[in-house]
Image (cartoon, helix red, strand yellow):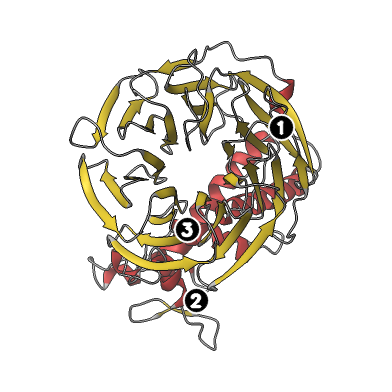
Amino acid sequence: RIVVIGGIKSEILQVIHRMAPPRGGSSRKTGAKRGGDALAASAASKRARPNGAFANGVDGEVSEDDDDSVVGSGAATSESEEEVETTDEARLRMAKEYLSVVEQETAAKAESDDDMANFNQDAIAHRLQRDAAEAKGYQYRFVAEKLGKQALPSAEAKLFRGHKLAVTCVALSGDELTAYSASKDGVVFQWDVERGSKTKIFPEGKFGKPIMALAVSTDGRFVAMGGKDAFVHVYDVKEKAMAHSFKGHRDAVSALAFRRNSHQLFSGSHDRTIKVWNLDEMCYVETLFGHQSEITGLTSLGKERCVSSGRDRSMRQWKIIEESQLIFRGHASAIDAVAMSSEEFFCGGGQDGGVSLWKLMKKKPCAMQRVAHGKDANGNPNWVAAVAALPYSDLIASGSCDGFVRLWQCKKENTQIEEVRKIPVAGFVNAIAFASSGKFILVGVGQEHRLGRWQRNAEAKNGVMVIPLTDEASLLVQE
C-alpha cells in the first residue's frame, strides 16, 4: 500500500507518470499533428470504475486495498508465468520503490531526536513536492547569487579552433560531453568537450552555404542545422549519418530549437514563419504564422510551446495545442536572441543594446538593462547578439562585442536584473550555451557579427570556447 504523505498523491503520480512505460511496451504513433505525446495519451486512456478501481488492461481489477493483486504475487502469478506487467501495475510498483528510496535518503539526513517521526514526514513531503515540481518543469533554483560569491574557477578556458570564418551558433548535448558548432563557412563540427578533438559532420564537400542555427535533442540523438540553403538538415548521431533534409521554408533558416526531452523540433526562418517537425516520424507537422519580419531566435523547454524573437521588435509565445500566440513588445530595435529560463520566465537581447526579462502574464518587460554591454566609438549601444539561460534557474548570460560575456541574476521573479560576473572574451560573442549542470558555458566567437560583416575584429580568433564557471560538480546541488 502506498502511504501518501501531506495529501500529495497527485504529485507522486506526476513523477511516476513520467517514469512508467507506455502500454504494450512501445510508443504508439501519434500522427503528424501531436508528435511526442504517446505517454500522455496512454494516461488519458485510464478509466475510473465506480468502486474506485482502475482498468488495468487485462482480466481483473486493481484495487487500492489489495497490494498482492497489483504486484502479481501469490495466486495471481500462478495463473500464468508469462503474464506481462501492465502500465498501471508498473506505475504502482515504481511508486512503492520511489517512496522507499525517498524515505531512506531522508532518514539518513535526519538527526536522532524526539521529533524524528514528524521531521521525517515533513522532509519526505517536501522532497516529494520538489521532485514532482521538477518532473513537471516547475522547480526553480536560485544559483546566481551563489555563483557571484564564489572565487573564479581554477580551470582555464579552452579554445577549440577549426572554423575558417566566424562561428554563428553552438549547441551542447544533455550529457555535456559533446558540443556542436557551425560557422559562416558552412561547416558543422562535433567536438569532444574534454579532449577538444573534432569531427566534421556536415557538409559532404569542403564548404557549404553559411549555417545560421543549430540545435541538439536532449538525449543527443539528433542534431538539427539550418542556414541560407533554406533546408532543415537532421544528423543522426547514433547512425553517424544524415537522417533527413526537410524542405519547406522559402528563405534562410535562422533559428532552431528542440522541445526538451522529446524529438519535436521548431524551426524559424527569414520567410517569417515557424515550422514544427516530428523527428520520430521524420515528418512535417504544421506552420505558425504571425511575425511581420525575419525570425532571429527560438527557444523551448518541456511544454509543447516555444518563444520566438524577430526583427519586427516582438517576441511571441506559441501554444501549439491551444493554437494561439502571445505577443510581447518592449525593445526599440530588432530582437536578435531569446532564451527561456523556465516555463514562465524568459529573456531577450536586442540591437538597442538591452537585455530584457519577461513573464508570460505581462506584455511588457519586467526588467530591462538598457545598455548591457556598453557603447561603441560612436556612442551607440553595442548590439546584444546572444543570450542564454540555465534552465529552471535565475542565471542568464549575454554576449556582444565589448570583450565580455556577462552573467546576470534575475531577482524577485524576473523583476530585477543584476550583473554577478563578467568573463573576458575577445571578439564577437555570437552564441552561448549553458551546460545542464551549470558547470561551464559554451561560447561561439568570431571576428565578425553572425548576421553581417559591417565590423571586424582582426585580433579575435574564430572558434568555440569552453569557459568553466565553478569548481563544483554542479551549480544545481540542492542545499
According to the picture, the residue beneath numbered tag 2 turns out to be 63
Q: Quadrant of residue 351?
A: top right
Q: Quadrant of residue 116?
A: top right
- How much space separates mark 3 and mark 1, taking CA atoms? 40 Å
In the rendered view, does 393 fall on the left or right side of 281? right
Q: Nearer the viewer, residue 419 or 330?
A: 330
In the rendered view, does 291 fall on the left or right side of 268? right
The disc, 2 or 3, on the residue closer to the chain's N-terminal end is 3
- How much space separates mark 2 and mark 1, taking CA atoms? 60 Å
Q: Secondary structure at mark 3?
A: helix
* Quadrant in which the C terminus is drawn: top right
According to the picture, the residue beneath numbered tag 1 turns out to be 372
The disc, 3 or 1, on the residue closer to the chain's N-terminal end is 3
Residue 202 lies, in percent from the top left, at 25, 37
Q: Secondary structure at mark 1?
A: loop
Q: Residues within 10 Å of mark 3 (few under 14, many from 20)?
A: some
Question: Which label sits in the foreground, 3 or 1?
Answer: 1
Labels in figure, total: 3
Q: Residue at x 55, y 82 (%)?
A: 52
Relative vertical location of residue 215 with respect to residue 310 in this rendering, above or below: above
Q: Residue at x 74, y 29 (%)?
A: 419
Residue 445 lies, in percent from the top left, at 48, 25
**For the residue marked with disc 2, what is the amino acid?**
Ser
Marks 3/1 in contact by CB < 8 Å: the verdict is no
**For the residue marked with disc 1, what is the amino acid?**
Ala
The disc, 2 or 1, on the residue closer to the chain's N-terminal end is 2
According to the picture, the residue beneath numbered tag 3 turns out to be 18
Q: Residue at x 63, y 23 (%)?
A: 402
**For the residue marked with disc 3, what is the amino acid?**
Arg
